Image (tube, coloured by chain):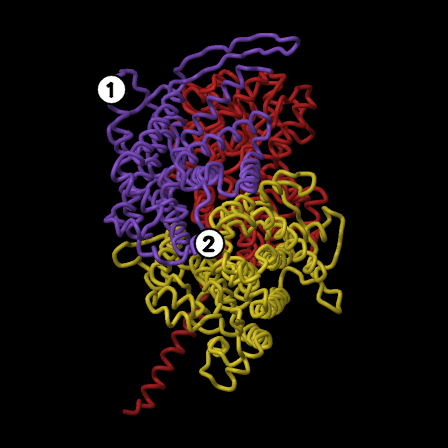
Amino acid sequence: MDAGILTQQTINALTIGAMYALIALGYTMVYGIIELINFAHGDVFMVGSFATLWLLATFGVEGTINDPARLVIVLIAMFAFAMVTMGLVGVVIERFAYRPLRRAPRLAPLITAIGVSFILQNLIQATYSTADFNIPQVIDPQAGVSFTMPTFNVGGFAVTSSAVTASWVHLFIVVLAVAMMVALQLFVRRTRLGRAMRSTAIDREAAQLMGVDINTTIALTFFIGSALAGAAGVAWALNYGHTKFDIGFQAGLKSFTAAVLGGIGNTTGAAIGGFLIAFVEVFSSQLGYARWSEAIVFSILILVLVFKPTGIMGQQLAERA
Amino acid sequence: MKPKPLAIVALVALVASACSSSAATAGPKVVTLGVDLPLSGAETPNGQPTLDGVQLAVDENPVAGYTVKVVAKDDALNGKHDPQTGATNVGQLITDSSVFAVVGPFNSNVAQAEIPKSNDAGLIQCSPANTNPGLTKGAAGLALRGSHPDKIAYVRVATTDDIQGQAGADIAYNVAGAKTAYIVDDTETYGKGLADQFETTFTKLGGTVVGHDGVGASGQADYTALLTAAKAKNPAFVYFGGVTATGGGLLRKQMVQAGMGSIPFGGGDGISDGSAATASSFLNVAGADGDANTYMTVAAVHDIPDAAKFAASYKAKYGSEPGAYSASGYACAQIFLQALAAKGSDREAVRAYVTNTSSTFTTVLGNITFDANGDTSQHVISDYKFDPTTKDWKYFEQKDFTSGVTTTAAP
Amino acid sequence: MNAPRLPVLRSDSAARQWFAGLPSSRTGQFFGNHQSLSVIVGMSIATAILPFIVLLPPFSGFGNQTDFVDGFAQAGVWVLLAIGLNVVVGLAGLLDLGYAAFFAIGAYTYAYGASPFSGNHIPFWPMLLVGAAVAAMFGLLLGAPTLRLRGDYLAIVTLGFGEIVPVVFNNSDQYTNGTNGITALYQPIIPFTSTSFGFGNPVPYYLTVAAIIAIAMALLYRLQDSRLGRAWMAVREDELAAASMGINTVTTKLLAFAIGASTSGLAGVYLSSKLAIVSPTQFGFTVSFTVLAMVVLGGMGNIWGVAAGAFVIYEIQSQGLKQLDGFVGSWFPNGLPVVGHVEFLNYQYLLYGLALVGMMLLRPEGLFPSRRRRAELHDVDDSAAANEELVEP
């Protein structure tokens, strides 16, 4: 057994999982509050990566930045820009495409969400074309820490280790994602606005009676969820240095699966789901089944839901009469 | 007020004379060259430049006595190539009596739905891009042309994957000297066909394939896990069956990030889409570090007489570099125009002339003749390696694979 | 003590009259009472008339008659898919986002039954039933693990199934010829002759699919009015209440999946016999979503509404949008007034998305909704009106 490879794959999985988790949070928050599967969310993530592309191009950033001070400033600018603009995009979409349909049966906003997804994809396609775009990777993707895992031999069971590289980009993304998730949890649990969000999710009418402004709360939820998707877009750009108009659908689908797996409506569950899906994908590749990874991910999802119908962390919601 | 009878008569006479006068003038005969390509959604970069190549050929090669119109049909449904739509399009081109030939389709599974129809109707199709051997060769090919097995109505100017895959294995084993290889395919017809052929030939030459996996859905961008697993197997060569759009460029880029940049990388003509300066080409996406040590094959003779002239006139008309299959689209159109000039616009006459194994056509891809199955009889593959000074592919040899992989290089 | 009973569709109720679209006249009641017959009559008339309507302008500008008939023969596939999904989503209220999986299963079943690849040559007509049965079986298989799932969890599971099936077909080279698909499928033979349908003439296919649709619709109308149909609607509206009324929600839901899947089995067999090939890339999420959009935009729950909606949407998508360039070009040869030359082909997706959003905002109940749906969405406070139509689908 090669501990080095396992460790390397674990690092890979954590990185991908972090991005899925960030996107999944947006899905789960929106679902929790208005019970809508926001199919356009994956495309918000995609637009976020294009926003990063635009920002770097406008300010003439061409490649890796070595000066740490400048790097920090550029990173802050990238995240702030993408998160704020994507947050606003989310609010606008909610206002015009979903709010009028709040009382409509479930399917109408679902169809609308997919319509919005098409619109976003086509707008980017019209502005940027269907080509692959390179985004300058401001953090050097090859810089990192190399090490080997300890090797030992226990009664014939040998553990070797090839070199493991933990690149700074990967670490940055994982740490950042975890920080954002923690910040989100604190916000939702400790602040007034967070309380408003939770109460709206539990019982919209009662919350209204208690003086919560539903429209603003829902808009805020969309803002935060979309901002997180924007952050995922930046992380994607940093990690892969690439974007294309169709990355939203796949990533969105996997993230949505993550959200469901973890228990939709539950933010901790979304994070867990994101990492879990990433691990399944990575280890499918490790075992040589990369071409089956999609089928494997969904099969695991179905299995989990058979035994735990509300997801890993989902609680049984009261049956509404 | 009652309309004056005289006015009515005058009006009718005027209209009648207008109609008859247009019939009276001889004028060139208007014929239509049908095109069926994927032209919308994610497929636009495949189909549109090819269509442009066809139109350019029609503009630059007039045929005396005929005005050739190009009618393009889009076989993409919801942004993706669709056999159902392709079959419908071919049906429409068949019922349009002014259509004398069809250029297309682009995708092999669309061709599978179209060949039976065009064969049944006797309307000739020339595909600029289909490479799946089963469309023409063997029992599969024969089964597709069930209505008229001996009167084929489908030819193609692209060399089939079973030939190009051999070239890839030849590069890996003989040129790069690799004894082990790891193969990645994009699970689509072209990519998988190429990769499978590479595997067969590489093993036959004496190499060992240490792994062969597929990368699936479009939009997937993460190959780090796959590459980590591949790295552990210590391949001396990595071969990619697929196109840039399904991940070739990203795969190479991430190889570098995974520390595998020094391992040579090879692909087929799916990654032959321009220099490092061309937007979204393989070389561009793979990045400077990735470009080093990469190989590519093109299913054509290298020394094409008019290649530069073609690129120049394409750029003059459309303002961008030709696409990967623009020249092939141009060539298909040239073949049909030459047939039109030689035999007129009768469908059967054109079909018979094009599929006649002794007809030779002068095209921008070189001289083309078709064998009894409709495949181009040209089996020369040109090999290219990345040149860091020009930042582009540089030709270094070509080989004829008519009798398999051990043929010596052609001059 | 009177136990509450499920309301019964009385023959003179508003429901029947509304269905006929005529005021409470004798003819209206006749059609209302004989729904299956009126479906068959209606479909026969439509099938006979359609090829001649397209000879008139403005349709004649879009293509010739043969092309149109071929288009109708294709549209029939989507109509079959839509009326099947309508059972699952519209009648039983089970959100299925992976419906294309059953379509793929039906298509590959025919490929197993009648292709050189498999070595079998079972005739088309029995294969229709086999395909429907196999798809229904898979409907049961998919339905089984989803029984305990609430609405949107069900959606994601069905979505997952819809992704798994094409991947399996794409990668199983030995059984399905993998990504190359299975070709040279045998075409149907005209009954009582030995002539194959052939590739040139769309008319046999057109008539076949019209017949299949008519029979399927007639059967579905019967089902809708039966106990099972009412059980579906009860489960859709309130599963807990339905269970309390003694409805076996397990079998109800399973049958919804099975019967809904069976029409896509029919569609799959029919389409693969028409194209003579089957390829794994034909059955992606886009197909599932398109059928769902057809059901919702057509008028969810209303069988003929969904069929008409599917037909209209398919024609617009495949003919209208694609010919839009030509059509607009003939009216505005020098480009549109403000925006100049617009390549509509490139903006198909955008237009489609805008149309979807627009439809949902303006008319979320769909083009041909059932009366109850329209009441729900437009007279939210007028619960009295809604309560009158107690059993309306």
B45 or A146, which lies in front? Answer: A146
Image point (51%, 63%), residue name: C233
Q: How many numbered discs?
A: 2
Secondary structure of the residue carrying numbered label 2: strand
Residue type pointed to by label 1 = Arg
- Can residue C271 be seen here? The reply is no
Image point (29%, 49%), residue name: A207
Residue A213 point in image, percent of width and height: 24, 48
Q: Which mark is drawn over residue A70?
A: 1
- Can residue C285 be seen here? The reply is yes
Image point (34%, 29%), residue name: A182
Q: Colour of chain B?
A: red
Q: Colour of chain C?
A: yellow
- Find residue B94 and report its image quarter: bottom right
Mark 1 and mark 2 on one chain = no
The chain letter of the purple chain reads A
Residue A244 point in image, percent of width and height: 40, 36
Residue type pointed to by label 2 = Val
Q: Which mark is drawn over residue B70?
A: 2
Relative height, residue C155 to residue C329 (above, below): above
- Find residue B203 and report its image quarter: top right
| Chain where mark 2 sits | B
Relative height, residue A98 to residue B9 (above, below): above
Left or right of residue C134: residue B231 = left
Residue C219 point in image, percent of width and height: 61, 68
Residue pushed farthest front?
C1
Secondary structure of the residue carrying numbered label 1: helix
